[in-house]
Amino acid sequence: IAISKDGTRVYVAIVAGAGALDVIDTATLTRVKTIRTEGGIHNVYVTPDGKWVVAGSIPGKKVHVIDQKTEAIAWTVPTEDGVRPIAFETNPDGSTKRMFVQISNFNGFLTVDFATHKIVDKIALPEAPKGEKVTEGLQGAPAHGLVVTPDGKTLGVLSKMNTRIYFYSLPD
């Protein structure tokens, strides 16, 4: 789940069936809208500026970007495999600059330019030393966990396969 910046809406990822995002009004505690997606939703986020709701689908293999005001899908980004965790980098004015997206069966992450809606980079994490790589229990997600530090200067990326967290300097 994710909550709007003003606290009036809760967005609930629906993974069952064709997939959707339920919108809950926090004042009445009722579902006010269901936004249909292409594939069940694994995770949902609100961008740091609060303007967008972002939902990733594993079976639909895409990121859905929803306008928070209209509660309608504004655009999507198709990916080569299922969408897992997502993190956001901001511009100096607080608007969203880039999304970092982990996908199934890839030990790394994608970089998506928020303005152009395009994947601009695919970064593979370093190989773990022999004997340290984990190959069992990954559930299709060798990399599963992203965070941008509060100062916006560092991206942390978790590799379940390598049992490590990697740090990348932003905006580099």
Image (cartoon, rainbow, N blue to C red):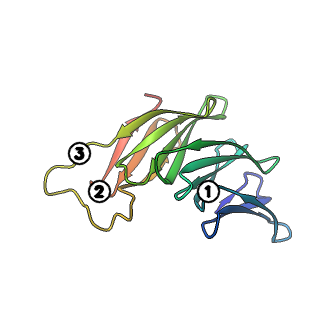
Residue at the spot 66% in from the left edge and 34% down from the top edge = 95
Give the amino acid type for the residue marked by disc 2 in the picture: Met
In what element is the residue under mark 1? Answer: strand
Q: What's the CA distance linking mark 1 and mark 3?
A: 29 Å
Tell me the quadrant of the picture where the N terminus can be found: bottom right
Residue 57 in the image: above or below residue 31: above
Residue 82 in the image: above or below residue 14: above
Q: What's the CA distance linking mark 2 and mark 3?
A: 9 Å
Q: Give the camera-side residue of 97 and 116.
A: 116
For disc 2, the marked residue is: 161
Going from N to C along the chain, the mark reached first, 1 or 2, is 1
Residue at the spot 23% in from the left edge and 45% down from the top edge = 127
Q: Position of residue 115 (x, y in %)?
A: 64, 30
Give the amino acid type for the residue marked by disc 3 in the picture: Glu
In what element is the residue under mark 3? Answer: loop
Give the amino acid type for the residue marked by disc 1 in the picture: Val
Horizontal arrangement in the rendering, residue 113 relative to residue 127 (left or right):
right
Q: Residues within 10 Å of mark 3 (few under 14, many from 20)?
A: few
Going from N to C along the chain, the mark reached first, 2 or 3, is 3
For disc 3, the marked residue is: 127
Q: Which mark is residue 44?
A: 1
Residue 97 in the image: above or below residue 20: above
Q: Give the camera-side residue of 6 and 110.
A: 110
In what element is the residue under mark 2? Answer: loop
* Quadrant of residue 21 within the rendered picture: bottom right
Q: Kindly check if marks 2 and 3 are in contact, taking CB atoms under 8 A apart as contact.
A: no
Q: Residues within 10 Å of mark 2 (few under 14, many from 20)?
A: many
Q: Kindly check if marks 1 and 3 are in contact, taking CB atoms under 8 A apart as contact.
A: no
Q: Position of residue 130 (x, y in %)?
A: 13, 52
Q: Kindly check if marks 1 and 2 are in contact, taking CB atoms under 8 A apart as contact.
A: no
